[in-house]
Amino acid sequence: MTLIVTGSIGIDTVHTPFGKAERVLGGSCTYFAAAASFYGPVRMVAAVGGDFTDEHHGALKRFPNVCVQGLEVRPGSKTFAWGGRYLDNMNDRETLFTELGVLAEDPPTPPEAYRDSRYVFLANTHPAVQRELLEHFPDRALAVADTMNLWIDTARDDLLALLAEVDGLLLNDEEARLLVEERNPITAAKRILDLGPTFAVVKKGEHGCVMAHREGLAALPAYPLEQVVDPTGAGDSFAGGMMGAIASGAASESGQPPTRQEALALETLQRSLAHGAVVASFTVESFSLDRLAAIDRGAIDDRLARFSQVVRVG
Ligand code: AMP
């Protein structure tokens, strides 16, 4: 599987009703890569600063399928750092601080060995950086992006230029509302298609997701969990499960890595949503990437089987 991701590697400080995690490994690229790594090797293109400790490196190494050849360490710079606090409902969160650090510098360059990447995921980072990475892969089969409030507010033009070039967009309901000024998530997802992509997935936290696609609609609840410890990274892990399943062939009818046409088919994408929901359900069971580091592909497949019983229709 030739899946590549760029985005943030973060040092996160997170408060939830269950406690606090201080300066732990996080970031959009990190959660994505760890989640997708259960399906095959994942190539990471990202940068960290001199404050990225051995412990942070060690936490990343727990995912042997994550290839870090494209990880740049910049000793004189600071790693992206983010702080957030979840309210009692565990769905709403307040950003306490965002320190861009290396995200405000020149983007990292993908290594030559990554040039044959067919499936590209642009995890949450500045949309100009996302676009720049895309240019390295003119022969890609599929390009999908994620974004968030900060970039919709501060880099809308770059984001709109990016949307004209990607096949799919993932974002949460609040972000979708901000982007297209539409409260209903289905209508918002459909409006996003007018901006360029073939599909748009709007995630609604514990209420699941809807996908608008040029050929129709799909929807899925979240995997039902009785206890959520820390929702950080759920969106990125959802994307990782989804893209890992697509790039490895786990979401294809044939079981083979898909052509561009197969990858973009509504059926393939719809199957991939369940993988996203299941992998995300593990992430939220602990702080940082701790729960993901403790599972294997078998645990994902077991939960997928249980999920298909839970959502059976007809
Ligand atoms: P999620 O909960 O899926 O939205 O992802 C949370 C992760 O995104 C955290 O680990 C943060 O380090 C990272 N993050 C938060 N804000 C940003 C941002 N503006 N750009 C890139 N990554 C971010």
Image (tube, rainbow, N blue to C red):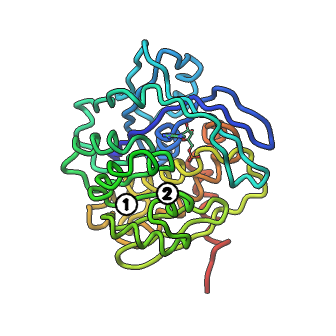
Percent coordinates x, y for residue 25 in the rendering: 58, 30
Residue placed most toward the observer, 147 or 282: 147
Which three-letter amino acid code belongs to the residue tagged 1?
Gly
Percent coordinates x, y for residue 98 in the rendering: 55, 34
Give left or right: position of 293 versus 249. right
Say which residue label 2 marks.
171
Name the image quarter holding the C terminus.
bottom right
At mark 2, the secondary structure is: strand
Specify the farthest residue to the left.
138
At mark 1, the secondary structure is: strand
Q: Residue at x 73, y 58 (%)?
A: 225
Give left or right: position of 279 versus 179. right
Percent coordinates x, y for residue 21 in the rendering: 71, 31
Residue placed most toward the observer, 155 or 269: 155
Q: Is residue 129 above or below residue 180?
A: above
Distance of mark 2 from mark 1, alpha carbons?
10 Å
Mark 2–mark 1 CB contact (< 8 Å): no
Say which residue label 1 marks.
168
Q: Residue at x 29, y 40 (%)?
A: 133
Instruction: Give the number of the mark in front: 2 or 1.
Output: 2
Q: Is residue 37 above or below residue 241?
A: above
Task: Give the class, few, some or many, for how many residues have Cα within 10 Å of label 1's Cα (few <14, many ≥20).
Answer: many
Residue placed most toward the observer, 283 or 194: 194
